[in-house]
C-alpha cells in the first residue's frame, strides 16, 4: 500500500494499493498500442485536448486546494498551483507548432531532405510532492502534445494529484490508455525501466532517486531526464536594492516551508549591507504565522512529513553547535514534528552541512562577502547547480557574474521562479536534461532524417 500521512495531524489521509507487476506490464502494453493512434492525430487536436484537460484541472481548484494542504501542508491562503500549472501548459501549447516543425534542408527537383521530430513512444513521468501539479505538467503537457503516451507515477505523499489529472484529461477526451496514472512501488518501476518499457523517463526528486533511475536504465539506452534538487544561492551586490532583495530572497527561502526545488538555501551579502540585510530578513520571518494550513491566517505550514523536518532540525542544531547564530526564537506552534520554526543563521561556514547539503526546509544561512569574486567562489562551492539569484542594478555586471556561476539558471533581481520560455535544467548533482521551452520538446522527441531522392 501507498499511504499519505497528512502533516496536519499525522493521520492517514489517503492510501492506494500498488499495481502488481503483471498488471503494470499490461498497462505499458496498452500505452504502447494507444500511442500510435494518438501520434497520428493532427497536432492541433492534441493541443486542444491537452488545453481542455488543463482547464478541467482549473475547474477542480476549490477541491484541490484543501487536498494539497492535507497531503503536503501548503497553506490554503496561497490558492493552490493552477496559476503556474496553466502558465506552463499554455506556453508549451503556444510554441508547439514551431518547436515540432520540420527542419527542411532541401526540396528541389532532385531531393527532399528534411529532419522531423518524432515522439519517443511511452514517456514515464515520476513527479515529486512539493509542487505536485506544476512539476508534473512540465512534462505531461509537452509529452502528450508531441504525440507520446504518458504514464504518471506520483509521489506517495500526493497520491490524489495523479488521479485528479487523469480524471481531468480523460474528461477532455484524451484516451485512458494514452494518459495513465499508476501507483507503483520502487522495484516495479525499476523493473519496467530495465525492461525497456519506456522511450523516455523524466524524474524529479532526490539524488538517490536519480541514481536509481540511471541504474535501472543502464544498458537500455532509454533517455533519462533528471532534476534532483539544489542548494541554490542568492548574492546581494553592493549596489542592490536591499529591501527588494530581502523580501524576495527570504520568501524564496521560506515559501512552501522551504520545500522548493529552486528555493534559496544560502545567501551571500556584500559586507557593507550585511547587518541591514540580516535585520530585514529576521523581521520578515518573525512576521510569519506557523500553523494549520487549513487556517486562512496561516502563512507557513508544516513540512510535508516529520522526517523531513528532522533533517532541518539536525542541520540547524549541528550548525549552532559549530558556532552559527540562530536569529529566530522558537515559534509557539513548533511541535518538534512536522511543524517547524523557520530559521535564519549567521556565522555559518561551508564546513557546515546546512551550507552544503540540501535542506529542503525553512532554514537559510547568510554570509558576508568582500566582492564579486568571493561571492562567485562560494556560490560555486556546491555539489548542486540548479539556480542562482544575483541582485544588482547593473545588468552587465549581473550577466558577467552569471557567466561564471555553475547552475542551470541565473536570475537577476528575482528568485524561485520557473519561466516556461526558458529551459529548466541543472548541472552537477542536480542532474541533467531540460524541461519546458523549445528544448523541452526536443528532449521529448527524437530527430528523424529523411533523405529522399526524387530522380
Image: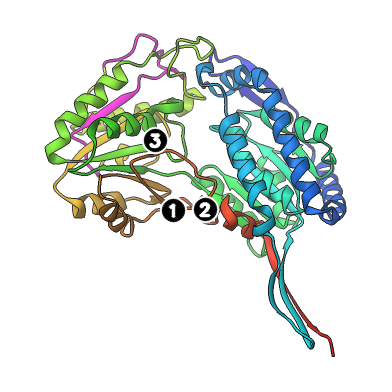
- Name the residue tied to disc 2: 423
At label 2, counting other C-alpha atoms closer than 10 Å, the crowd grade (few under 14, some 14-19, many 20 or more) is some
- Tell me which numbered mark, 3 or 1, is placed earlier along the sequence: 3
Badge 2 element: loop
Give percent across and percent down for residue 324: 20, 31
Tell me the quarter of the image containing the N terminus: top right
Q: Distance between the residues labelled 1 and 2?
A: 8 Å
Is residue 411 toward the left or the right of residue 160 in the image? left
- Residue 290's mark? none
Query: Against 334, is 96 above or below?
Result: below
Decide: is 221 above or below 237.
Answer: below
Q: Give the range drawn in magenta.
A: 329-350
Using the image as rendered, state which of residue 120 and residue 169 is in the foreground. 169
| Residue farthest toward the front in the current orientation of the protein | 109
Residue 362 position in % (x across, y down):
38, 27
- What secondary structure predominates along the stretch shown in magenta? loop
Residue assigned mark 1: 408
Amino acid at each position: 500500500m501507498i499511504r499519505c500521512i497528512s502533516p496536519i495531524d499525522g493521520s492517514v489521509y489517503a492510501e492506494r494499493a500498488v499495481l502488481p507487476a503483471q498488471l503494470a506490464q499490461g498497462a505499458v502494453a496498452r500505452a504502447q498500442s494507444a500511442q500510435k493512434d494518438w501520434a497520428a492525430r493532427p497536432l492541433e487536436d492534441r493541443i486542444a485536448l491537452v488545453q481542455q484537460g488543463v482547464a478541467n484541472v482549473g475547474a477542480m481548484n476549490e477541491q484541490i486546494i484543501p487536498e494539497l494542504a492535507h497531503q503536503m501542508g501548503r497553506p490554503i491562503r496561497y490558492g493552490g498551483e493552477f496559476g503556474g500549472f496553466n502558465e506552463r501548459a499554455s506556453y508549451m501549447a503556444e510554441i508547439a507548432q514551431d518547436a515540432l516543425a520540420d527542419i527542411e534542408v532541401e526540396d528541389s527537383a532532385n531531393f527532399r531532405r528534411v529532419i522531423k521530430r518524432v515522439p519517443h513512444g511511452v514517456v514515464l513521468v515520476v513527479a515529486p510532492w512539493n509542487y505536485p501539479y506544476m512539476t508534473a505538467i512540465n512534462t505531461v503537457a509537452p509529452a502528450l502534445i508531441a504525440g507520446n503516451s504518458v504514464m504518471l507515477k506520483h509521489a506517495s505523499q500526493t497520491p490524489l494529484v495523479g488521479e485528479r489529472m487523469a480524471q481531468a484529461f480523460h474528461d477532455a477526451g484524451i484516451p485512458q490508455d494514452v494518459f495513465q496514472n499508476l501507483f507503483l512501488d520502487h522495484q516495479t518501476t525499476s523493473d519496467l525501466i530495465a525492461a525497456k518499457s519506456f522511450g523516455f523517463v523524466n524524474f524529479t526528486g532526490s539524488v538517490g532517486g536519480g541514481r536509481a533511475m540511471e541504474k535501472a536504465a543502464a544498458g537500455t539506452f532509454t533517455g533519462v531526464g533528471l532534476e534532483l534538487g539544489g542548494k541554490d544561492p542568492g548574492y546581494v551586490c553592493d549596489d542592490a536594492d536591499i529591501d527588494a532583495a530581502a523580501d524576495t530572497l527570504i520568501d524564496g527561502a521560506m515559501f512552501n516551508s522551504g520545500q522548493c526545488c529552486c528555493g534559496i538555501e544560502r545567501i551571500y551579502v556584500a559586507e557593507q549591507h550585511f547587518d541591514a540585510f540580516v535585520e530585514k530578513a529576521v523581521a520578515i520571518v518573525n512576521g510569519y504565522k506557523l500553523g494549520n494550513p487549513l487556517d486562512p491566517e496561516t502563512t507557513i505550514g508544516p513540512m510535508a512529513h516529520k522526517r523531513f523536518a528532522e533533517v532541518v532540525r539536525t542541520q540547524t542544531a549541528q550548525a549552532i553547535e559549530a558556532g552559527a547564530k540562530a536569529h529566530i526564537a522558537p515559534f509557539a506552534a513548533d511541535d518538534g514534528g512536522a511543524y517547524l520554526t523557520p530559521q535564519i543563521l549567521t556565522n555559518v561556514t561551508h564546513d557546515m552541512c546546512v551550507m552544503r547539503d540540501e535542506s529542503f526546509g525553512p532554514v537559510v544561512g547568510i554570509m558576508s562577502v568582500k566582492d564579486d569574486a568571493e561571492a562567485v567562489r562560494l556560490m560555486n562551492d556546491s555539489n548542486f547547480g540548479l539556480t542562482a539569484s544575483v541582485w544588482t542594478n547593473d545588468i552587465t555586471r549581473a550577466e558577467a557574474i552569471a557567466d561564471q556561476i555553475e547552475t542551470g539558471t541565473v536570475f537577476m533581481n528575482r528568485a524561485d521562479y520557473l519561466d516556461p520560455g526558458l529551459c529548466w535544467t541543472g548541472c552537477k548533482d542536480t542532474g541533467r536534461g531540460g524541461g519546458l521551452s523549445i528544448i523541452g520538446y526536443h528532449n521529448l522527441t527524437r530527430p528523424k532524417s529523411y533523405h529522399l531522392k526524387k530522380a
